[in-house]
């Protein structure tokens, strides 16, 4: 199995590779060679595929995490890989740090990751430890050339003035004025020109409900 076969398999599930890096022998990972591949929803094709799944329809908790685990475990079997997940309770695996290492995502002015194509809406469904080696990314940090940095001033309650004020954010989300963030997604994330318009409102609203 190869990287291009993985791309094709991911596309069938509305997923794609959002970054990767070569494993070093001293990494605290269960493999000492090969690569760690970060996998994200390919938006907007992901949402209709996910909402047709049994996990979305069975009314049980955490449908997207359960869907991700089923798909990721099957991909791991097909590609001689190990699947790792960003959810499942503390201690969490360091997806943020792995995203930085991929060279395709960076710490934005508001702390959230900004990705070269997904912008601030980047999120990861899983990582696969695959046996092959990947080339280094050639992407460059987008925020240096983003003159107005609209993400920094878009939050209506200034939740990014000093780190991320989760309580202030959630208070706003519970208020009538917070319905824009609740139904369209975080206004600060929406403000980033990268990846704009890719996330469907229904997908954004799903995550905001589970966040709140
Ligand atoms: C706990 C957690 C939260 C907490 C606290 C976040 C925080 N301050 O770190 C809360 C509940 C607040 C949160 C909220 C959200 N999160 Co969150 N979260 C996580 C989670 C599960 C664990 C983080 C962790 O402790 N990792 C373990 C440590 C040891 O490793 P590490 O993450 O590499 O450590 C680095 C980061 O913590 C980073 N860091 C330090 N301070 C801060 C502050 C912020 C704001 C961020 C983003 C990072 C960060 O520095 C560390 C060293 O490099 C990760 C998934 C994961 N497994 O990493 C997602 C993750 C970071 N979250 C993510 C997302 C998508 C969200 C939401 C946007 C969810 C949503 N609604 O869609 C919301 C934000 C709401 C909004 N305004 O839209 C994404 C990344 C998004 C991005 N663009 O940055 C991740 C990677 C999950 C994923 N599946 O992709 N999250
Ligand atoms: S969801 Fe809304 S209130 Fe919360 S940080 Fe984003 S813009 Fe601010
Ligand atoms: S709005 Fe500009 S500064 Fe903010 S994350 Fe996007 S590219 Fe970076």
Image (tube, grey):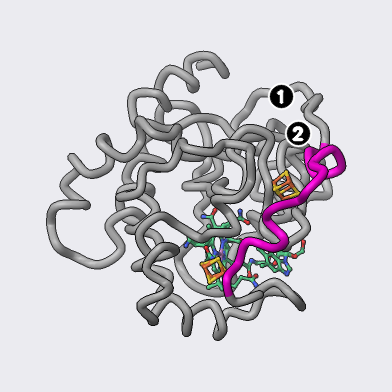
For this orientation, the residue located farthest to the right is: 144
Please tell me which residue is depicted at 59% across the width and 32% down the height of the picture.
130
Please tell me which residue is depicted at 67% across the width and 58% down the height of the picture.
112
Write down the residue under mark 2: 22
Any part of residue 5 in sight: yes
Number of other residues with Cα within 10 Å of mark 2, as a class: few under 14, some 14 to 19, many 20 or more: many
Give the camera-side residue of 66 and 109.
109
Residue 179 occupies which quadrant of the picture? bottom left
Q: Up-down: is 151 above or below 175?
A: above
Q: Up-down: is 103 above or below 167?
A: above
Q: Up-down: is 85 above or below 162?
A: above
**Which residues fall within the magenta stretch?**
141-156
Q: Earlier in the sequence, mark 2 or mark 1?
A: 2
Give the camera-side residue of 190 and 12.
190
For this orientation, the residue located farthest to the left is: 58
The quadrant of the image that shows the C terminus is: bottom left
Number of other residues with Cα within 10 Å of mark 1, as a class: few under 14, some 14 to 19, many 20 or more: some
Mark carried by residue 153: none
Q: CA distance from mark 2 to mark 1?
A: 6 Å
Residue 146 in magenta?
Answer: yes
Image location of residue 52, percent across then percent down = 18, 40
Write down the residue under mark 1: 133
Residue 153 in magenta?
Answer: yes
Residue 169 occupies which quadrant of the picture? bottom right
Q: Is residue 58 left or right of residue 144?
A: left
Q: Up-down: is 74 above or below 11?
A: below
């Amino acid at each position: 199995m190869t990287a291009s076969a993985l791309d094709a398999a991911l596309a069938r599930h509305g997923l794609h590779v959002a970054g990767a890096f070569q494993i070093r022998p001293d990494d605290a990972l269960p493999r000492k060679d090969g690569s760690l591949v970060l996998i994200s929803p390919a938006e907007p094709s992901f949402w209709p595929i996910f909402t047709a799944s049994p996990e979305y329809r069975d009314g049980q908790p955490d449908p997207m995490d359960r869907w991700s685990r089923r798909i990721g475990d099957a991909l791991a079997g097909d590609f001689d890989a190990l699947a790792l997940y960003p959810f499942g309770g503390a201690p969490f695996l360091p997806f943020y740090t792995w995203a930085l290492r991929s060279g395709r995502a960076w710490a934005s002015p508001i702390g959230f990751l900004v990705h070269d194509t997904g912008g601030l809406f980047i999120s990861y469904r899983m990582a696969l430890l695959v046996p092959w080696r990947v080339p280094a990314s050639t992407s460059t940090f987008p925020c240096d050339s983003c003159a107005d940095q609209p993400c920094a001033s878009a939050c209506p309650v200034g939740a990014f003035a000093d780190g991320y004020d989760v309580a202030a954010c959630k208070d706003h989300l519970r208020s009538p004025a917070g319905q824009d963030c609740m139904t369209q997604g975080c206004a600060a994330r929406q403000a980033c020109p990268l990846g704009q318009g890719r996330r469907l409102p229904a997908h954004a609203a799903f995550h905001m409900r589970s966040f709140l």
